[in-house]
Image (cartoon, helix red, strand yellow):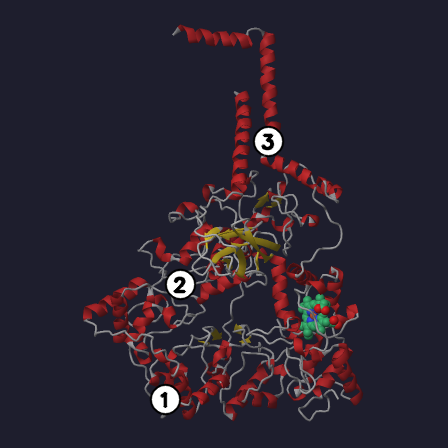
Amino acid sequence: MESPRKSKSSLWHALFGDPVRAFGVVSVVLLLALAVAPTKEHFSQWHRYQRQYLTEIHDRGDSISLRRRFSPGIHQIWLPELGVVDRCTTCHLGLNEASLSDVRQQPFRKHPVIPHKLEGFGCVICHGGQGAATTVAEAHRSERDGEMPILPTRFIEAGCGQCHQNALAGTPQLNLGRAMLTRYGCVHCHSILRPDGTKVAATDHPPSLVHVADKTTREWIYSWLKDPQAYAPSTTMPNYKLSDADASDISAYLISTSRPQAGDTATPDAKASASPDPAAGASLYGQSFCSSCHAVQNAAGNLVGGDVGPELTRIGNKVKPEWLLAWLNNPRVYDATTPMPHYRLTAPQLATLAGYMQGKTDTDYGANVHLTAATTQQVAHGKLLISTLGCAACHEINGVAKPENFAPELSSIGSKPRAQIVFLPGMERSLPSYITGKVRQPGAFGAGVKMPQFALTNAQTDALTTALLALTSRSRAIPDTLRVAYVPETAYQPAGHAGRLMTELACFSCHRINGRGGDMAPDLTAEGSSVQRQWLVDFLKNPNTLRPALIRRMPRFNLSDGESEVLTDYMLTVYQSPAIDQEMGLATTPDVIERGRQLYYSKYACQGCHIIDAKVDKGYIGPTLTSVGSRLTPAWIYEWLKNPEAVRAGTMQPNQNISDEDSQALAAFLSSLKGAASKGAKP
Amino acid sequence: MMQHTSVRTIVRSLACYVTLAFLCACQHAPTAAVPQAKATGAAIVESSGGHQVGSTGAALKEPIVVQVNDDKGTPLSGALVTFHGDGVTPDPAAMLTDSSGQATTTVTLGAIAGRYQLTASTPTASHPATATLVEIGLAYQERLGALLADKHCTRCHDPESSAERVSNYDNLAVKPHSFSDGSTLNKLSDADLFAIIQHGGPALSRSPLMPAYAGTLSASDVRALIAYTRSIADPPYQPAGTFYAHK
């Protein structure tokens, strides 16, 4: 017991025995204590990187100016309104140095060119990570208290999506992912609120199953449920990996509860199967431009056609002949909100087209499906399955209500802390890899997971992951003034007889008017200022080819004279642009016209894209101008030439900064082109 | 007490260095198991997947497929193929050829825009045989350029038609060049490209069939187009001007 106490006191004595010694010891301790900070700094990572940077630039041609722009110590970008305190530039020293573009070694690489300035936004807003940290590990990988590690480059567009709520040129992956969230039905089950509080709405059109027995058979539903992609590889319907019995029970429930739709049986007096003429059918299918919206697999197995409507490769396997006839006659009877237009087909046309469609049958498909009549228990079990699997979240189904919030909300999924995630064994333990894994193969996360298997390519999975990773809590905290807000589709609806016709013809499926509608065909908001009355009447009745190079075209709806005139008059009255003055006087003397002709062929070389005389001109990009003088109004041509983009946003026609005088001469020349007999063409 | 702390800090930072150094060193030596070869080939050739234009940091769309042949030129299965390249991540990096003599891998590009080389090699009786593939990675600016080119330019500049679009090339009296045609475009300086895109053919005393885009595209759009053409140039574009040699 004695000796330790004794040695302790002797140590005390050795150090602080007399005042001088004590002073010396205290000084040494103090000195060392003071040295801690500089030593720590000297050995810190960032200091080492700064020394390394100086070595790196030492031998370069512009090392003097590089060194002048280098300042030692911790660098910081501080943006209080964004909550940014980024010290990344302490180590990432070459981000703004154009001459370092050949440097491949991090952290000295030059930043790729982007539309934002580093000083304006800092780094972590886009990249994630901890801006205030001064060590690599903490800055890049910290997950303390729900901190988000750096976003892998693969998903970097998610960073853009935090502020930019609309599609952005230059972020194709984010745009695709967002489009898929609405197109693949994700938002039928998961609700997603944008940072501004608006709800992401679905853009797909899952069919109502209320009258499904009119349309198809129980056998087809069974085969479809077992493997939707086997019927149509391009369908967005996921695979629920149902057992034979479950698929059979669901199909039994759907058929047994289906109510007949009045009108489906009131088919026109033609018989579809009566002597189909494949050649005539194919030509009617082509003329009606069905392929603008519907795809069909060609002999080589490639899908050809649009994706607005369902794929039709095996449509004959699916639909009942009488339903098909009724549908082609007027799709709005069966489905009042379908994007499909009501073509006014005659009875013989209907028979030809329906017969042709019915011929798209794969005799092997569903050949060995034989279902026995279902018992009441089986039907009840089918209903139970439908409610547990959430089928009614997408489809209207008799006797099963649409479930609310069927799946977890995803509005902040991009900030989900790792601690709340259950990873699979062997999986990289990060949020991006979790989301990718879940989207790619939900079933791997346990038998209880209700999310079905989607048929997605890796690029699609990455795109969806990007769109989801953009939904961060930071995106909600960003001030409104900095956010590029989502511009929702308007609820514009034209009125009166013309409005009804436009609904029946589904004009909005392809055309945009006053902020509502598709983008397959031109925006018609100012169409009335652009075209001449007789031309529009004729065009609506028989849309001829304006742009020979276009694959998707305006179909022929077989409108009556009266319908065509109602539509024309409405458009000419209502769809006027205030910027176009129809009363402007345009000099049309032969001199002016001749000058316009010269400008057309020499100064502006318009023949590069447009055809006036098909014998000599071949330009393929823009519309044919042979009779443009009877199609467009002179005032519109004049304004268009001066600034095409102002007249129709997104047009391909370049703005050539044509002067008033040149525009007038060109407009006069073009207005003089009235058709094949025109003298305006190149001699 | 203080003495202790500072010593501990130094020791700790030293330990950090060592682990960091180890971590860095380890990154260059992938630890994936290399399969045991069952056959030895004589040559390796590219089947498909070269010359793709992808995005930096992302996987290329098409897989990379190479084929190992024996000395008679017939495909050989069970031969070992390893893939490696600076800045690219092949997955898997090593594999045996399948029954048709082919080895397939997917490749993720690094974060810098530009050309990436991927080398596939297989051991032969003497030295390893190699096949080298070149892939191109586009970063944000080049990708924007690609989109703009697709919207405004390729109809005239690319003689090939696609299913979605008919080429206008044949209809032009003066023929433009494809943007990847390095032998022509590499000779034009950035300033010349800028001038002809902004002000049209006449800016370089060329045909007005090349329209002026100054009213349509912003200066940064035009820079993006130039960056894109430079990045896909074949033969590759070497910027003129000062070179900073590495010592």
Badges 3 and 2, same chain = yes
Q: Distance between the residues labelled 3 and 2?
A: 51 Å
| Amino acid type at mark 2 | Phe
Residue A62's image quarter?
top right
Q: Which of marks 1 and 3 is nearer the N terminus?
A: 3
Residue A628's image quarter?
bottom right
Residue A281's image quarter?
bottom left
| Amino acid type at mark 3 | Phe
At 60% from the left edge and 52% from the top edge, which residue is drawn?
B112
Q: Position of residue A130 (x, y in %)?
A: 54, 43
Position of residue A454 relative to residue A25, above or below, is below
- On the picture, is A441 further left or further right than A603? left
Q: How far apart are marks 1 and 2 (CA)?
A: 35 Å
At 54% from the left edge and 24% from the top edge, which residue is drawn?
B7
Report which residue position mark 3 lands on: A43
How crowded pointer 2 is (Cα within 10 Å; few <14, some 14-19, many 20+) is rated as many
Q: Which of marks 1 and 2 is nearer the N terminus?
A: 1
Out of A335 and A551, give the one closest to the viewer.
A551
Secondary structure of residue under mark 3: helix
Secondary structure of residue under mark 1: loop
Question: Which image quarter holds the C terminus of chain A?
Answer: bottom right
Question: Which image quarter holds the N terminus of chain A?
Answer: top left
Q: Position of residue A361 (x, y in %)?
A: 37, 80
Q: Which chain carries label 1?
A: A
Report which residue position mark 1 lands on: A272
Report which residue position mark 2 lands on: A454
